Image (cartoon, rainbow, N blue to C red):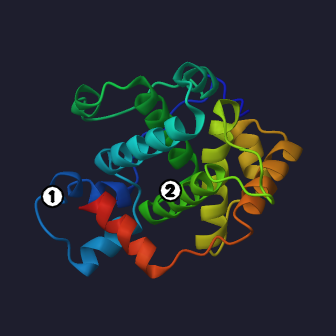
Amino acid sequence: MIDVQHTYKLSPYADEGFRKSDYLGEEMSQKSLSKLETDTILSSPPTDHVLGLLSAHIAHILRSLCGNETDLLNCLPSLEPSVRHDTIFTNNPDPLFKRIFAFLQLILAYSGGTVSESLYAIYLIEKLAFSDLRPTSKHPGQIVHAQTAGTLIICAYVLSIKTLRDRPLPNAWWMKVFGIQGKVLESSELAFLSRLEFDTHISQENFDRLTIHFLS
């Protein structure tokens, strides 16, 4: 179980790259994006609009895997999201969505995560969920439940950033920022990879599918 205390304060997205891409939150749904625009978005932090879509998708996956929403809410860190558009929560008042939105904000604020890294993390979560919902003799039990939901999200970003960055964040960084014991993080990462049979490759077709789904 991830132990994220309330002492962690959400950092505002004030970097130049985010400001440059901020206008895209409204424009994306109104026109097809050029390759240059898409590449710019993928290398930038997610806007609130995109983060909302990612959060809703993860909420749907966790409900499918865990069932008991009360347990999910009790186990995910209780954080207050920082948003510039209150309509995000007006349009989706779901408490699980709000909890995940704030958790993703925390991860992205500290790690400097990008849209591309978030899409890859989503892909890994989808793939793990697919495996978890279809037990086999090799993997008979479900590894994702309410108590490990936070760990699932953290591990997905750990693996995504390790895969996509030339200089990824070491495990020691994640341990310090999120208060995770080294053995817990390492065993969780190994369990995640084992359930995926160490196949974390994403095809261009699947990446394009996610890009179209979340950026259009």
Q: Could you tell me residue 46's position as x and y percent?
A: 38, 54
- Give the amino acid type for the residue marked by disc 2 in the picture: Ile
Question: Mark number for residue 27?
Answer: 1
Name the image quarter holding residue 216.
bottom left
Q: Could you tell whether 119 is left or right of 127 in the image?
A: left
Any mark on residue 78, and which?
none
Question: Which residue ends up furthest to the right in the rendered image?
Answer: 183
Question: Is 109 placed above or below 77 here?
Answer: below
Whole-percent x, y for residue 24 in the image: 22, 58
Q: On the image, numbered disc 2 is attached to which residue?
A: 122
What residue appears at the point 30 percent right and 67 percent down from the top-left corner? 212
Q: How many marks?
A: 2
Reply above or below: 22 against 69: below
User: Are there few (<14), some (14-19), or many (20+) residues within 10 Å of tag 1?
Assistant: few
Q: Secondary structure at mark 2?
A: helix
Residue 113 visible in the displayed image? no
Amino acid type for the residue under numbered disc 1: Glu
> Is residue 107 in view?
yes
Q: Residue at x 61, y 49 (%)?
A: 133
Q: Is residue 70 above or below residue 3?
A: above
> Marks 2 and 1, Cα distance to the nearest angstrom?
23 Å
Q: Earlier in the sequence, mark 2 or mark 1?
A: 1
Q: Residues within 10 Å of mark 2 (few under 14, many from 20)?
A: many
